[in-house]
Image (cartoon, rainbow, N blue to C red):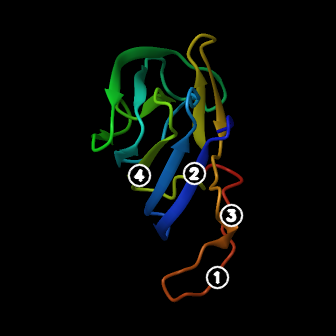
Amino acid sequence: MGGDIAQWLLYRQNESLSISSLVVPPGVETPVHDHLAWGLVGLYQGTQQETFFRRVDDGTADQGHAELERVETRRAGPGDCYELIPPDGDIHSVETTSDVPSVSIHVLGADIGCIPRHAFDADADSVNLFQSGYTNVDCEEMVDDDGHGHVHTHDELP
């Protein structure tokens, strides 16, 4: 996501569950993005300002034109939790407002670092595909339930 933002994979099961930690330095804001999966997020350290959006175009474009409507802005501190539920509760940006990095724990119903998602420019009414990846694990390093490794990539949307 840029800006020295780190996403650390803590656990993943197949493609249906991931637990990760997002670390955002002071004064840094993530791009407006979606998750394309249900999720629960809890803030462990620091404070954040979260701005939530809703897509108001037909929602079919993965690249190019996309219109967003700002829904609300919330502040979060240690111990605060919130849910992510697509399609209308899934698009947001996060800015660390504390003097220390914000650290959040994400439990999501997808392997969030390895799936193509959307980054939005709300001012330019545009959207682009991106894959956030993980700071500590490559997406190709997936291991199945039997402990056997296999190649796993997301070069194209299903």
Kindly report the distance in space between the C-alpha atoms of the residues bearing marks 3 and 1.
12 Å
Q: CA distance from mark 4 to mark 1?
A: 26 Å
Q: Nearer the viewer, mark 3 or mark 2?
A: 2
Give how far across and how far down residue 34 sits, in percent: 49, 36
Of labels 3 and 2, earlier in sequence is 2
Residue 108 coordinates in the image, percent (x, y): 40, 53
Q: Nearer the viewer, residue 138 or 50?
A: 50
Q: CA distance from mark 3 to mark 2?
A: 12 Å
Residue at (66, 72) in percent of width and height: 141
The amino acid marked with disc number 3 is Asp
Image marks 4 and 1: residues in contact by CB distance under 8 Å: no
Q: Earlier in the sequence, mark 3 or mark 1?
A: 3
Secondary-structure class at tag 2: strand
Label number found at residue 105: 4
Whether residue 36 is visible: no
Residue drawn at 41 percent across, 27 percent down: 50
Mark toward the viewer: 4 or 1: 4
Q: Residue at x 42, y 38 (%)?
A: 46
Instruction: Say which residue label 2 marks.
Output: 7
- Place residue 19 in its image quadrant: bottom left
Against 10, residue 79 (above or below) is above
Give above or below for 124 relative to 135. above
Q: Earlier in the sequence, mark 4 or mark 2?
A: 2
User: Which residue corresponds to mark 3?
Assistant: 138
Q: Quick check: 100 left or right of 78?
A: right
